Image (spheres, rainbow, N blue to C red):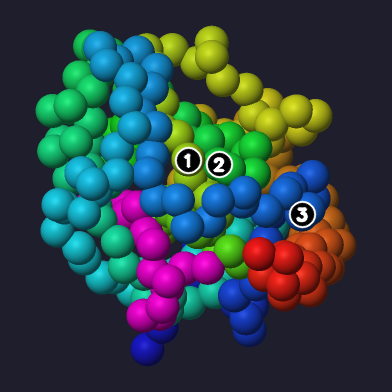
Amino acid sequence: MNKPLPPGQFEYPSFDRFGLGLFAKRLPHSPDLKSLKIAGDVRREMIVGRELTTLQRVEQVSDFHCVTTWSYRGLRWSGVRFSEFYRDVVQRCAEPLDGADFVVFRGQDGYAVSMQLKDLMADEVLLADELDGEPIGIAHGAPWRLVAPAHYGYKNAKHISAIEFWRNSRNYRFPFPYPNLMDHPRGRVALEERARYLPNWMVRLVYKALAPGARRKMRAALARQREAAPAADARR
């Protein structure tokens, strides 16, 4: 039997690509490039690729909860645990400075979102590159996406190209022109940390009303990408 959904969520029948409307047309420029930049308050900024292949791969089944109130159950993700990536790659190779626990994920599509290191160290948090036994694809975050089931979907960054470790938040803002109040410092689903300052009933109503339009934009963008792909291959 499925466990109850978190507060304010309803079950949706399909797992569609979803996100802020501004990014509907911004698909990744290099979805096959699996290297990541490590930057911020670290002793050595670096690009890692081969290092990721040395980490133990894991598979987990978890639910996805969008901040706009819909949820999809039972997604089977595969990748590497963020905690192992941090200990075996980031700490060993890049050497974050003391207190660099404000983490920023930057995507190939220009999206950026923050997480706290203590939340990322949970066993269920992954850097994933496969979904349901297949490469994750453009629709859901290629080449890497964050899977943090305890946090709303907007914290689960897609198309990750860089991960930054900072001692404070001065080098980050939620993507312009969206207001910073949309980005809760934690974004935990169980506590309904949907946004800063605003009451949850208001956030639910606004986001739920915007969700259908955002979903249409995403579907149209993917359709255009599929149409453009054969033409690009023909020119090679």
- The magenta segment is 122-137
Quarter of the C terminus within the rendering? bottom right
Relative to residue 104, is residue 87 drawn left or right?
left
Where residue 12 appears, as percent x and y from the top left, is: 64, 78
Quarter of the image for residue 10 reads: bottom right
Q: Which amino acid does label 1 sit on?
A: Ser
Residue 24 circle label: 3
- Label 2: state its secondary structure: strand
Is residue 25 highlighted in magenta?
no
Q: Residue at x 76, y 54 (%)?
A: 24
Tag 1 residue? 161
Q: Are marks 1 and 2 in contact (CB under 8 Å)?
A: yes
Rendered view: 184 above or below 3: above
- 100 lies above or below 191: above
Callouts 2 and 3 close, C-beta under 8 Å: no
- Label 3 SS: loop
